[in-house]
Image (cartoon, coloured by chain):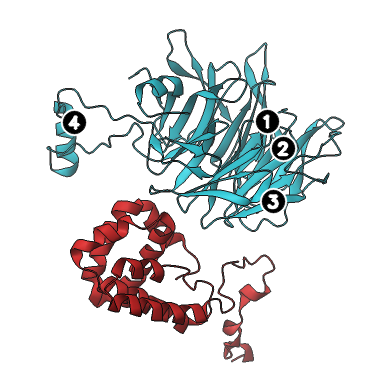
Amino acid sequence: MTTKTEQQLFVGSPVTSHAFNGALDKLVVSDNSTTVYIYAKEANGKWTKETELQKHIERVKCVDWAPKTNRIATCAGDRNAYVWNLNETTGVWAPSLVLLRIERAATYIRWSPAEDRFAVGSGARLLSVCFYENEHDWWVSKHIKKPIRSTILCVDWHPSNYILAIGSCDFKCRVFSSALKETYDKPETSGWMPKLSKFATMLAEFSTQGWVHSVKFSPSGDKLAWVAHDASINIVHMDNHDTVIRSLTPSLPILTVIWASENSVVCGGHDNFPSLFNIVAGESVSKGIRLDVKEKKAGGGMSAMARFKALDRTGDDTKDASLDTTHQNSIIELRVVKSDATGNCSQFSSIGMDGKIVHWDLDALASSISDLKI
Amino acid sequence: MSKNVNSTQFRTVDVDAYDEDNYEDDARDTGDSGAAEVTERANQVRGLLNQLKTKEALKIALKNPPVGNKDASVKEQNYETVVSVLKSFKAADIDAAVADLDMVEIDILMKYLYKGFTCSPDKAASLLQWHEKVVAKGGLGSIVRVMVDRKGI
């Protein structure tokens, strides 16, 4: 079913992670199993399964696609991560093992903006920053351990390529320097790093009441947003670490956040729909605007098929058990699909525990929802 | 029988204390913040209730709860203050009072309501009336914040 604001793809089991390639015609998806799938967009706009990447022996928790260098990184509960390279002539994706040296499952993986390194968060309470070592032809890692005290749930890279933010289960969001000597980084000072700091130096630490589910730098890198399990949205500017703009939302906890522009974020979580929040006057966050427009069902009733299904399952054929949101279960991850040079997002995608991957057109939504201002 | 079977002393050893990776919560109760403030507040609230200024009394009762205090009696005293205010409201006035509160006060009120459910189950009926109105304003998020709160009010 496609409307001008959404297109949907149904994977069939809960989707834990997804990423688009640079050309936006391929999608890598992990469906809570040991296999990773690549979907390709055909000429008629439909997405079909193209390849299977099978190497992990435990559930794949997270995937990421480096758009410029065209490499896929995956990490799983088997304490491993693989970098997959595409052989152009055969069309086969070949995995190369990454030595993470962790004793627990890997939970999150993200390529850096320059795509010469990636960060892997894990349940071993440490972050592995992995880069390619040419002499030995493999990926090696350096650890950021102190003072992270619990499982890392999310990581985001700053546009500069040597600063990253980590959200973890010890209720803290932290910013670290990841300037590596091995890759000849030349870091410069900035609001996040007022003095040149070496690898694994903690630059900032922020507390919340709940696990930090998602953390993102704004498109310019000046602001940092994170969402926690206490149903809050927190935003801080790099120049003033003491003033955290905190919004205690009336909704269920949010699991994922992306920046729609320099001053607005889109969030999704256990409420099953994405909502847009604007930063007002640099001081507070507006009320969330629901982006999932409820459409009245044509015909105002259940189909015969739905009636028999409901009768079979619940013994009552009068109530339609489906939710009025597009996603029938929590939204796990949001990704910016298309954005312009200043970082204004025009399209984003969401994946859910219901197995759906939904593509949202923010520009089309802006015109159809009356008070939507980004 | 061999000697080591009889003694079960080893069961009293706190193994977590020897674990160097043991997670220690930052949110443990330390210090005695606000003990004097709590007594002061109790007096203020009593005064306002005598003058039937229930809405003002509610606002004052919900200010600065003694969250970090390790003395349970101080927390208990503040709890009693809040409950006395809640009791003094007529059912029709609850809506107006809740509309006046901001999100932080809503969260504190919700925490006290849930404390009331556990400590004073006999008052559950009136607390539930409050609960309904507070959820209408604070949403499910305010209940979530009660559940993830580690310090306890």
Is residue A103 visible in the rendered image? The answer is: no
Chain at numbered mark 4: A
Who's cyan, chain-wise? A
Whether residue B112 sits left or right of residue A52 in the image: it is: left
Chain hosting mark 2? A
Mark 2 lies on a secondary structure that is strand
Query: Which disc, if any, is residue A306?
Result: 4
The Cα–Cα distance between marks 3 and 4, rounded to whole angstroms, is 53 Å
Do marks 3 and 4 share a chain?
yes
Question: Reading the chain from its start, which is encountered first: label 2 or label 3?
Answer: 2
Labels 4, 2: front one: 4
- The chain carrying label 1 is A
Q: Quadrant of the N terminus of chain A?
A: top left
**Dots 2 and 1 on the same chain:** yes
For the residues bearing labels 2 and 1, Cβ distance under 8 angstroms: yes
In the rendered structure, which amino acid carries the disc numbered 3? Ala
Nearer-N-terminus badge (4/2): 2
User: Which is in the foreground here, disc 3 or disc 4?
Assistant: 3
Give the color of chain B as drawn.
red
Amino acid at pointer 2? Val
Q: Work out whether mark 2 precedes mark 1 in sequence or the reverse, and give the earlier one.
A: 1
CA distance separating discs 3 and 1: 30 Å
